[in-house]
Each structure stands twice: as C-alpha cells, then as structure tokens.
C-alpha cells in the first residue's frame, strides 16, 4: 500500500510548473515520466512553491532536530522541540 496524500514543497518555481503541466507527462524526459507515474499512483497530491526565505527556516528546523537525535544501544531516540515560526 502506497501513500494516499503527498505534499511537495520546493523553492524552485520551474519544478512546480513542470510537474503541474500534465502535457509534459508524455515528455521524452525519463525522470519527468517517472515522476508523473509515481504521482498518478497517489490519490491526492499537491506541489507548492515556497519562497527560498521560508524554505531556509524549515531547513534550520530540520537540522536542529537531526542534531538532537541521539544514538543509544537499543536504537535511535529522537527528541523533538517546539519552534514558533
């Protein structure tokens, strides 16, 4: 069973436009064809342009969470923090 809902955020506007263009599904680009085939298998998907400034905030949060992840003998323990953006 695959994903039912997917949200894609990117700061590259051209990627958003290209993936949203259904006519490009028949493109000669193997990568683009593969992306469209993968998205067809998902019930609900959305791709959204996020300005680079906002994307940097998310990137910093992800790095903070990664740095707070500690390794123990029994596996990984993840510690999460709340960040107001």
Image (spheres, rainbow, N blue to C red):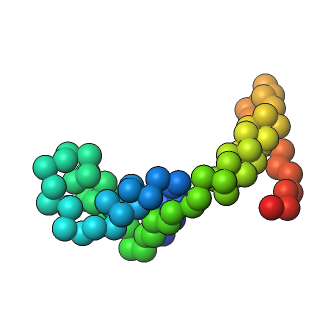
Give the x, y percent position of residue 17: 36, 63
Q: Nearer the viewer, residue 67 or 25?
A: 25
Q: Quadrant of the C terminus?
A: bottom right
Residue at the image point whose x is 72% and y is 51% from the top: 57
Q: Position of residue 30 (x, y in %)?
A: 20, 45
Quadrant of the rendered image containing residue 72: top right
Which residue is pictured at 26% across the width and 59% down the height?
37
Q: Is residue 70 left or right of residue 25?
A: right
Q: Which residue is rendered at x = 78% and y = 28% of the image? A: 71
Does residue 24 sit above or below 46 in this rendering? Answer: above
Residue 1 lies, in percent from the top left, at: 40, 61
Which of the 4 image quadrants contains residue 65?
A: top right
17, 64: nearer the viewer: 17
Eyeballing the image, is 77 above or below 84? above
Q: Is residue 59 left or right of residue 71?
A: left
Q: Residue at x 60, y 52 (%)?
A: 52
């Amino acid at each position: 069973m695959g994903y039912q809902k997917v949200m894609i955020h990117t700061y590259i506007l051209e990627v958003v436009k290209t993936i949203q263009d259904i006519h490009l599904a028949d493109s000669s680009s193997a990568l683009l064809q593969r992306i469209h085939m993968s998205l067809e298998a998902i019930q609900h998907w959305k791709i959204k342009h996020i300005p680079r400034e906002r994307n940097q905030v998310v990137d910093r949060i992800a790095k903070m969470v990664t740095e707070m992840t500690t390794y123990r003998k029994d596996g990984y323990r993840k510690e999460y923090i709340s960040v107001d953006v």
